[in-house]
Image (cartoon, rainbow, N blue to C red):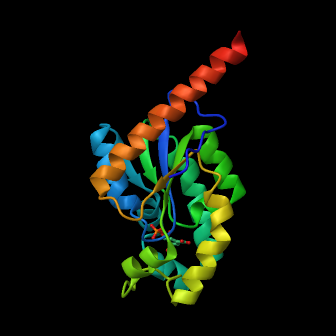
């Protein structure tokens, strides 16, 4: 596990964003984390489905991926207005620089980092994700997104641990990151 020190964590961070590829457990872990911290859980994909009035698969099929990405960015700007939430982002949301800026401004980001092998196992037979068309496509997509994912504040190895353990790990890392930021802030101020 890397010790990724954030450059500019706001204290206290208002929103906690879960970032990562399809199948890395953002929704499961996000729900548990929200429960543990007595926060509201928001799944950005759910907001998109609600707003569009149709499933993500249908949005992709009928309106195209570009339209989906526009909705994703638009609704990200809406969900960040919800106070003290844990927000799970779809696997492609953190790829856009504009979206990353919104996330940085509104809270702290946590990447649930999973290897391709684990992702492929978890997504095997799952037909609800329009981009899950072949293992090769998933491999290329994951590889192309790693530089974006690595810009998060905190990286968590999400390959093996049970969701409840991941929640504790996230809390520990966030505490450390926030303490570190405060310490650096104090040093800079003196
Ligand atoms: C996508 C991931 C999906 C969903 C959409 C596109 C992506 O969310 O937003 O199918 O581009 O990786 P999950 O990561 O929650 O599966």
Q: Dividing the picture into quarters, in which one does residue 149 lie?
A: bottom right
Q: Residue at x 51, y 76 (%)?
A: 116
Residue 87 appears in the figure: yes
Which quadrant is the C terminus positioned in? top right
Q: Is residue 84 above or below residue 20?
A: above
Q: Residue at x 58, y 71 (%)?
A: 68
Residue closest to the eye, 185 or 101: 185
69 lies left or right of 27: right
151 lies left or right of 180: right
Q: Residue 29: x percent and y percent? A: 35, 55
Residue most extreme to the top: 190
Residue closest to the eye, 56 or 53: 56
Q: Residue at x 28, y 52 (%)?
A: 164
Q: Residue at x 58, y 44 (%)?
A: 4
Q: Dividing the picture into quarters, in which one does residue 146 lie?
A: bottom right
- Figure disc tally: 0
Q: Residue 128: x percent and y percent? A: 40, 81
Q: Is residue 53 above or below residue 88?
A: below
Residue closest to the eye, 157 or 23: 157
Residue most extreme to the front: 1
31 lies left or right of 76: left
Q: Is residue 134 above or below residue 86?
A: below
Residue 55 appears in the figure: no
Q: Is residue 158 above or below residue 11?
A: below
Residue closest to the eye, 111 or 107: 111
């Amino acid at each position: 596990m890397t010790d990724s020190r954030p450059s500019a964590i706001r204290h206290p961070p208002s929103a906690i964003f879960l970032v990562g590829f399809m199948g890395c457990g953002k929704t499961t872990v996000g729900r548990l984390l929200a429960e543990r911290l007595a926060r509201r859980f928001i799944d950005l994909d759910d907001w998109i489905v609600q707003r569009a009035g149709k499933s993500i698969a249908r949005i992709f099929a009928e309106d195209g991926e570009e339209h989906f990405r526009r909705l994703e960015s638009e609704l990200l700007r809406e969900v960040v207005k919800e106070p003290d939430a844990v927000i799970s982002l779809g696997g492609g949301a953190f790829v856009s620089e504009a979206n990353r800026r919104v996330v940085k401004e509104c809270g702290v980001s946590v990447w649930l980092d999973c290897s391709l092998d684990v992702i492929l196992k978890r997504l095997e037979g799952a037909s609800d994700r329009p981009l899950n068309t072949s293992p090769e496509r998933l491999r290329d997509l994951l590889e192309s997104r790693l530089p974006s994912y690595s810009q998060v504040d905190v990286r968590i190895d999400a390959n093996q641990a049970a969701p409840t353990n991941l929640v504790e790990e996230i809390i520990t890392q966030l505490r450390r990151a926030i303490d570190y930021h405060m310490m650096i802030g104090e040093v800079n101020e003196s």
